[in-house]
Image (cartoon, rainbow, N blue to C red):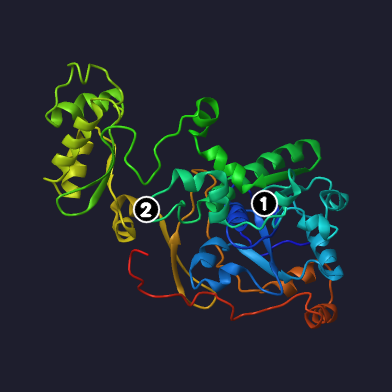
Amino acid sequence: MWDNKNLPKFGPLAGVKVVHATLAQAAPLGAQFLAEYGADVIWVENALTGDVSRYTNSFLIEQDRKNQRTIALNIPTPEGKEILLKLIKEADIFIENSKGGQYAKWGLTDEVLWEVNPKLVIAHITGYGLTGIPEYVNRPAFDTVVQAYAGMSFTNANPNGAYASPYFADMAGAVFTAMSVLAALNKAKETGIGESIDIAQFEILMRLQQYMCDWFSAKYVYEQAGYPSAYGGCGVFTCKDGKQIQTHSMGAGVLRNIIPFLGLEYGGKLYPENISMVRSADPNGAPLTEALKAYLLTKTAVEAEEELQALGLPCNKINDYQDVEDDPHVNARGMITEWKSFKGTDVRCVGIVPKFKKNPGKMWRPAPYMGMDNEEILGQLGYSTEFIEELYKKKVISNDKDMNLCVPMKGKKLGW
């Protein structure tokens, strides 16, 4: 029976067992969220190449593989499939990301997995899904490419680029993965019957574009992110000190305060009482935007933020990472967590969110190096030391203490 003897009991997912055979970002991050709330998580890493995240010279792998054990396994080999099925036999959740149908080609269909564990919740994360037109199902996918397919690049078009960075499809996919496997787990515990979840990243991006429904229903398209807002007084503006501020002049109470503050007549023909929004294309749109622009050129970003927020206007100066790091509210909420990697490197990363009052998440173990827990996990599955040595010789498993584990760049200038 596999069980992490060193795992402290904490969080709302204590006792839940998760296996994920994933790489890069979307799927591993979904499993990471579960690990942060107490689940016992085993990461099955590709024994031949390692995870692509290990090649990035970034602290990302330290942030997004903590609290986990890992086994570096060559899944398609007969021994690899046997080991994976032994892990799955005791798991509650199995997550994988690959091109659509890859596991079926290996003989590891959902039905095969359910023969081993009928209650298993399975999540398949792909760019284009498991069903539909075969040529699309088999397409290779990466975050920015999926954004282009799903219309996200179109809505974020601007002169300097056309995708939501950094890797929005992966981040959103991770959240949907964690949400969906926990929903399925709740039902599986009730019925004893497992579930298979088809998570297509392009579909998630379509769902998150809230105004796509207006195009499908009425062929109306909103402004693209890199161009002026469709609403007066909304957008990014430059202040006297050259810094920028984001404003959102919307809502009856907000406009009641901001319109006269900017020297415009409130309650008249252009801006009648209780008006809740101003469209840029309407006669009253440009005057509001121009008045706000003129005001902001007389104030620093900090001064403008203070004065406008006092009027109830949603706004904020555009913070760079140093601003975020120094922000008193960020620090009051403990949003930067510090630890040492297994190689002794100082790591500072974003803390665990959301925050639970009674069963909070916890960071208790750094990210493992490649194959770090091979012997421990395989020993718990009943394999002898001699057999494990044979697996190394046959390249069914591997171990690389020197791969990544954080020797990243230092002092990179803000801005790309």
Q: Is residue 95 left or right of residue 286?
A: right
Q: Quadrant of residue 315?
A: top left
Residue at image coords 67%, 67%: 70
Q: Is residue 227 left or right of residue 201?
A: left
Q: Secondary structure at mark 2?
A: loop
- Pointer 1: what residue? 125
Mark 1, Cα crowd under 10 Å, few <14 / some 14-19 / many 20+, is many
Placement of 65 over or under 290, stated as above or below: below
Q: Quadrant of residue 334?
A: bottom left
Mark 2, Cα crowd under 10 Å, few <14 / some 14-19 / many 20+, is few
| Disc 2/disc 1 C-alpha distance (Å) | 32 Å
Placement of 147 over or under 374, stated as above or below: above
Along the line of sight, the residue nearer the viewer: 204 or 121: 204
The percent position of residue 90, horizontal first and vertical second, equals 79, 55
Q: Is residue 355 visible?
A: no
The residue type indicated by label 1 comes to Ile
Marks 2 and 1: which is nearer the front?
A: 2
Quadrant holding the N terminus: bottom right
The percent position of residue 372, horizontal first and vertical second, equals 66, 74
Q: Secondary structure at mark 1?
A: strand
The percent position of residue 25, horizontal first and vertical second, equals 57, 59
Residue at image coords 55%, 73%: 55
- Pointer 2: what residue? 159
Placement of 200 over or under 214, stated as above or below: below
Proximity of marks 2 and 1: CB atoms separated by less than 8 Å: no
The residue type indicated by label 2 comes to Pro
Along the line of sight, the residue nearer the viewer: 386 or 140: 140
Quadrant holding the C terminus: bottom left
Along the line of sight, the residue nearer the viewer: 107 or 371: 107
Residue at image coords 84%, 76%: 384
The percent position of residue 121, horizontal first and vertical second, equals 74, 46
